[in-house]
Image (cartoon, helix red, strand yellow):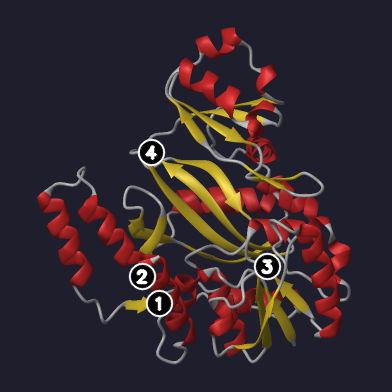
Amino acid sequence: MRILVLDANQRSALAVTRSLGAAHATVLTADDSPQALAGCSRYSSLYLQCPSPANQPQAFLSWLRDTVTAQRIDWVFPVTEISSQLILLESQALGTARIPFATLDQVMALADKWQLMQLAQKANVPHPRTVYFANAAALRPETIDALTYPVVVKPSQSRRWLGDGWLSTGVHIANSATELTALLRDMLYLRDFPFMLQEFIPGHGAGVFALYNRGKPVTFFAHQRLREKPPRGGVSVLSQSAPLAPKLLDAAKTLLDAAQWHGVAMVEFRVTAEGDPYLMEVNTRFWGSLQLAIDSGVNFPALLLKTCLGEAVEPVRDYRVGQRLRWLLGDVDGLYLVLRDPGFNRQQKLRRLFDFFTPHFDNTRHEVNRWGDLGPAWFELRAWLRALVG
């Protein structure tokens, strides 16, 4: 079994590489830099530099086609939205290899946020009130004035394929008609492409992680973020496995059942103070804290490969709750940002310092730093130091 893991600078790619390599597959890794995080793992038998799927999509597809043949690749595992959707759009580049994803139509039914809201409506999955607009011109001034603010302005696709390149978009919150008008005027992806206006749901974010096998659920997982970078909301630098909340699990399962899903997915919700979940979006690929699920006993990459090979897979019903995962250098960055931020008072900064230096040897593992596989940690540290002094 020869597997090519793309996007090797992503920490999720490192988790996939370690998981599949430990399962005795021959893992090759690739990214657009001379060396990459997962490429430094002892579980990567060969690292290959490739053209960027974001900036050189046609060159990347040509490279992939040649590499699949030359390296006798059986499976290709992309871990970013751009690389996975590009390969699904141009599937002939895979040659004889396969990709562990659902069909393009199934993926876009969840990745396209307007299609997702329509599916949620049909499946009776709670979601924010949503109105679709083909472009900025379709939203009349009188409608803008009549809206209740704040309102969420959400493009239908996070990354839009234009045929020869990608257009990146972003989600915004408009607090007034003036702010919304400025967004519609200034943002190309709102002026020319579909977007939605959604009601703002106060609360906190939560997610359910899932593996499906051709429409049938295999296993689920949940975690909570304990610290983030930036500290007011960003990527997780310290997370902890958590029990599956029944309301969230039921909503995620209902949605993925309706989609006849296959593969992995992360279903994201906004949860109100009363505990009611509202569907936000679905990531149709591996997620950033994948290693936490693996450490907790839900080895998603290995389980996914087994389902793709038609092997029997036993669902994981009792994973370890309270297992922690720490991205050490990200946590250092987060601490620095807290100490520099005048919005945090002295007590909050001391608390963050105390929490940072308090050891949790019994239930915490480092995401990148692993004694049996130190190559990625040295690579990350060198890159971090170069950025620090540069």
Instruction: Give the Cα separation between the discs numbered 4 and 3.
Output: 34 Å
Position of residue 15 in the picture relative to residue 343 (left or right): right
- Identify the mark nearer the N-term, 4 or 3: 3
Circle 4 is placed at which residue position? 272
Label 3, residues with CA under 10 Å away: few <14, some 14-19, many ≥20: many
Q: Quadrant of residue 355?
A: bottom left
Camera-nearest label, 4 or 3: 3
- Identify the mark nearer the N-term, 4 or 1: 4
Kind of residue sitting beneath label 4 = Thr
For the N terminus, the quadrant is bottom right
Kind of residue sitting beneath label 1 = Leu
Q: Which label is found at residue 329?
A: 2
Q: Residue at x 51, y 10 (%)?
A: 145
Instruction: Give the Cα separation between the discs numbered 1 and 2.
Output: 8 Å
Q: Residue at x 41, y 85 (%)?
A: 370
- Identify the mark nearer the N-term, 3 or 2: 3
Q: Percent x, y for residue 45?
A: 65, 90
Label 1, secondary structure: give it.
helix
Label 3, secondary structure: give it.
loop
Nearer to us in this view, 362 or 73: 73
Kind of residue sitting beneath label 2 = Leu
**Given contact means CB atoms under 8 Å apart, are the residues at marks 1 and 2 in contact?**
yes
Label 4, residues with CA under 10 Å away: few <14, some 14-19, many ≥20: some
Res. 271 in view: yes
Q: Which label is found at residue 78?
A: 3
Position of residue 345 in the picture relative to residue 31 (left or right): left
Position of residue 143 in the picture relative to residue 357 (left or right): right
Instruction: Give the Cα separation between the discs numbered 2 and 4.
Output: 32 Å
Position of residue 35 in the picture relative to residue 288 (left or right): right
Q: Residue at x 43, y 33 (%)?
A: 201
